[in-house]
Amino acid sequence: MNKLSRMAELVGLLEKEQTLTDSDLRELFDILAESCSEDADRCVQIREEIPAARCTEEEALLYAAARRAREKYYGNDVYLRGLIEFTNYCRNNCYYCGIRTGNTRIDRYRLDKDTILECCREGYALGFRTFVLQGGEDPYFANSINGDERLCDIVSSIHGEFPDCAVTLSIGERSRESYQRLFDAGARRYLLRHEAASPDLYRTLHPSEMSLENRKRCLYDLKEIGYQVGAGLMVGPPGQTTEHLIEDLKYLQELQPDMIGIGPYIPQADTPFGRSTAKCAQGLDKTQKLQLTLRLLAVLRILFPYALIPSTTALASLDPHGRILGLQAGANVIMPNLSPASARENYSIYDNKLYTGAESAQGMTALQKQVEAAGYQIVTDIGDVKCH
Ligand code: SAM
């Protein structure tokens, strides 16, 4: 059987069963990788209006199946999330992240409640019905009664002023009691990428004081409390292999998250990975990261047809067409930045992160045009997960 027919068979199985054995998944990723390196002339366009959207026939089969899956649950709707990066203080020292505590070369900031509410007001007027408060694990908001009170005050103020909106938190690992208090204050969704389901890879990416067990404990606590939960990972960091990605897929199947965030790993110069001159410390190259992120996104969409999956800022930062390519590979959420302009440049988790134009609330008209040209529509909707 030739590779294209085998790919059609694997995609068919994936669509029908919404699962694949490890060896079938391995074969699927291998065929996709080989088809790309073998014959660039066999590339087809995903959509004619986006010249960069070239992919092999094998990839086109996968993306078409992913689009069928998302259309079944979500049609062509794209949900908006207004991202408010409210603090870049962080107690952690992840080797890849620009806001790690060991980075002395960024200006630290923390937004106050009034500024955050102003961001929400601007977003609400533009049609946003979800506000995502994201930040480092800031000691000021730490897992203590004081820290919880400060956060709960912000959450309940947003919830009180915008009762028809969802408040999503993405503020890292906390105690179950703290997650419960934030839920009681009105938060209903939580994004916490598991980062790597393989203990070995997790250890390569994080210092010893962080643990995969605690990350997983947090995700299960959040689920049990009743949050809509998002997990996910970076694609292409140093040391990540296909086997690791298969472990991630298996873990996600066990967790059954409502949201899945994946984006390419992009080096940041003031981190241990970014500073290293070793080629392997840079992870995959740009093209490989783009291709692999899109393929993984499509596989995720077929495995989790109900899930809310963003076409991430990292994807858009990696490639000018990244955001739209992400939608065409199965994503159905975009997260423009609502933070004040002065804060954005300091939330520098990786280099050359986009925060203006269509990535920002101010660029909504441009974003809308891009999305519509690709055949999708941005909706003003709270955008809860569809049942699974
Ligand atoms: N502190 C919270 C947490 O740990 O979940 C949220 C903030 S953290 C900066 C948000 C996400 O940024 C992480 O889950 C990680 O996957 C991503 N990230 C960090 N550094 C990155 C990099 N260099 N390239 C791409 N993504 C990165």
Image: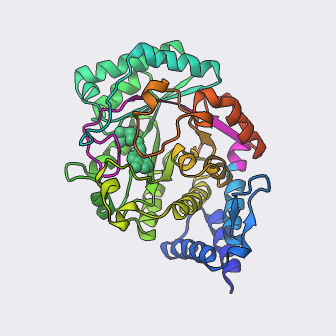
Query: Is 3 in front, or is 386?
Result: 3
Q: Is residue 124 above or below residue 57?
A: above
Write the residue at 25% across / 40% down: 101
Magenta range = 71-100
Write the residue at 70% across / 54% down: 67
Across and down, in percent, residue 113 comes to: 40, 16
Q: How many marks?
A: 0
Query: Is 217 in front, or is 308?
Result: 308
The residue most toward the bottom is: 1
Q: Identify the image quadrant of residue 302.
A: bottom right
What scheme was used to colour the molecule? rainbow
Across and down, in percent, residue 127 comes to: 65, 24
Quarter of the figure that contains the N terminus? bottom right
Residue 221 visible to the viewer: no
The verdict on residue 78 being magenta is: yes
Across and down, in percent, residue 184 comes to: 39, 23
Residue 207 visible to the viewer: yes
The verdict on residue 208 being magenta is: no
Q: Is residue 258 left or right of residue 197?
A: right
Across and down, in percent, residue 64 comes to: 72, 60
Write the residue at 39% across / 61% down: 282
Q: Is residue 65 above or below residue 263?
A: below
The residue most toward the left is: 209
Q: Identify the image quadrant of residue 151.
A: top left
Write the residue at 77% across / 43% down: 373
Q: Ligand 1 shows up in which quadrant of the image?
A: top left
